[in-house]
Image (cartoon, rainbow, N blue to C red):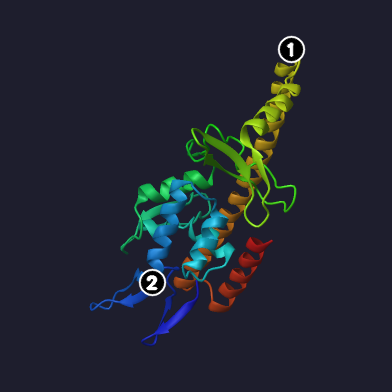
């Protein structure tokens, strides 16, 4: 957080999506900056759906007009300020905790908590899987590669005198075309060759599951370690902001802390 000079006094710069204002009573506060707040609201709602990962959402948000680095984006989606709360960092033996702020929230606490669960890997959408829809007569459409131009073969039906005939084909002007019935049958023949002998299926299943669990545990641990480190960096930044506002930390010292935290988040 930087400091901005206003009416001869220093005030902390508002978080991304908010802007500093002074009320008629002279009280300094923050209000949503609609141009950015609407994008951030979309960001949290998109993350809560768990349809795309955080990096994909960040890239889409940038295309929507959000000017934000990936590291600052990570810190923002962890910041409870957007649901109307203020994080009080850990101090000595007292644990960190959140208090209700006086500013207007951009999202609800429910959405913020859901996003944190998704980021921590505690909540996944079981229905969020790629869906492939294909006609029964053309099950391989989109999976076959054209031997002439290396594009994926499409498929369609062609009406004869009495019946419809199905084909896998490439786009013009390539002209590659195969009868779907013949291709499907040849594919079945190849699949039958891959059927394991009795007893081996269980062995394969156990090996695959063991490998999958091992890899999943490793990835989850790496993800948790990264998120914990980013949380610590965020807490240090929040603590430095509070100390600067209270006059305990000078602006120059705060800038040094900010540079160190930014570098650690980038590494």
Q: Position of residue 59 (x, y in %)?
A: 55, 62
| Label number found at residue 199 | 1
Q: Quadrant of the C terminus?
A: bottom right
Q: Position of residue 6 (x, y in %)?
A: 38, 84
Q: Is residue 82 left or right of 208 when viewed as pictured?
A: left
Left or right, 131 with reference to 169: left
Q: Residue 247's x, y, as percent?
A: 47, 74
Residue at 58 percent of width and 59 percent of height: 233
Location of mark 2 (residue): 35
Q: Is residue 149 left or right of residue 97?
A: right
> As displayed, is residue 257 above or below residue 105?
below
Residue located farthest toward the left when viewing the structure as drawn: 24
Q: Are marks 1 and 2 in contact (CB under 8 Å)?
A: no
In front: label 1 or label 2: 1
Q: Residue furthest bottom?
A: 8
Front residue of this view, candidates 171 and 202: 171
Judge whether residue 33 can be spotted in this image: no
Where 2 sits versus 58, above or below?
below
User: As displayed, is residue 159 above or below residue 260?
Assistant: above
| Residue 87, picture quadrant | bottom left
Q: Secondary structure at mark 2?
A: helix
Q: Residue at x 36, y 50 (%)?
A: 109
Dot 1: element? loop
């Amino acid at each position: 957080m930087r400091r901005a000079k206003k009416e001869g006094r220093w005030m902390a710069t508002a978080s991304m999506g908010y802007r500093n204002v002074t009320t008629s009573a002279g009280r300094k506060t923050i209000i949503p900056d609609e141009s950015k707040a609407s994008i951030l609201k979309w960001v949290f709602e998109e993350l809560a759906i768990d349809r795309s990962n955080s990096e994909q959402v960040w890239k889409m948000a940038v295309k929507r007009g959000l000017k934000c680095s990936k590291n600052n984006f990570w810190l923002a989606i962890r910041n409870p300020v957007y649901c109307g709360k203020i994080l009080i960092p850990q101090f000595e033996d007292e644990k960190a905790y959140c208090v209700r702020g006086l500013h207007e929230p951009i999202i609800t606490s429910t959405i913020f908590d859901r996003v944190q669960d998704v980021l921590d890997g505690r909540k996944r959408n079981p229905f969020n899987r790629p869906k492939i829809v294909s006609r029964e007569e053309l099950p391989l459409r989109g999976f076959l590669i054209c031997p002439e131009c290396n594009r994926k073969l499409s498929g369609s039906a062609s009406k004869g005198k009495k019946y419809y005939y199905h084909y896998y084909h490439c786009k013009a002007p390539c002209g590659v075309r195969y009868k779907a019935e013949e291709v499907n049958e040849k594919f079945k023949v190849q699949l039958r060759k891959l059927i394991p002998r009795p007893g081996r299926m269980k062995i394969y299943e156990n090996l695959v599951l063991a490998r999958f669990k091992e890899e999943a545990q490793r990835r989850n641990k790496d993800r948790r370690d990264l998120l914990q480190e980013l949380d610590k960096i965020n807490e240090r930044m929040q603590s430095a902001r509070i100390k600067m506002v209270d006059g305990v930390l000078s602006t120059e010292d705060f800038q040094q802390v900010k540079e160190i935290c930014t570098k650690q988040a980038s590494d």
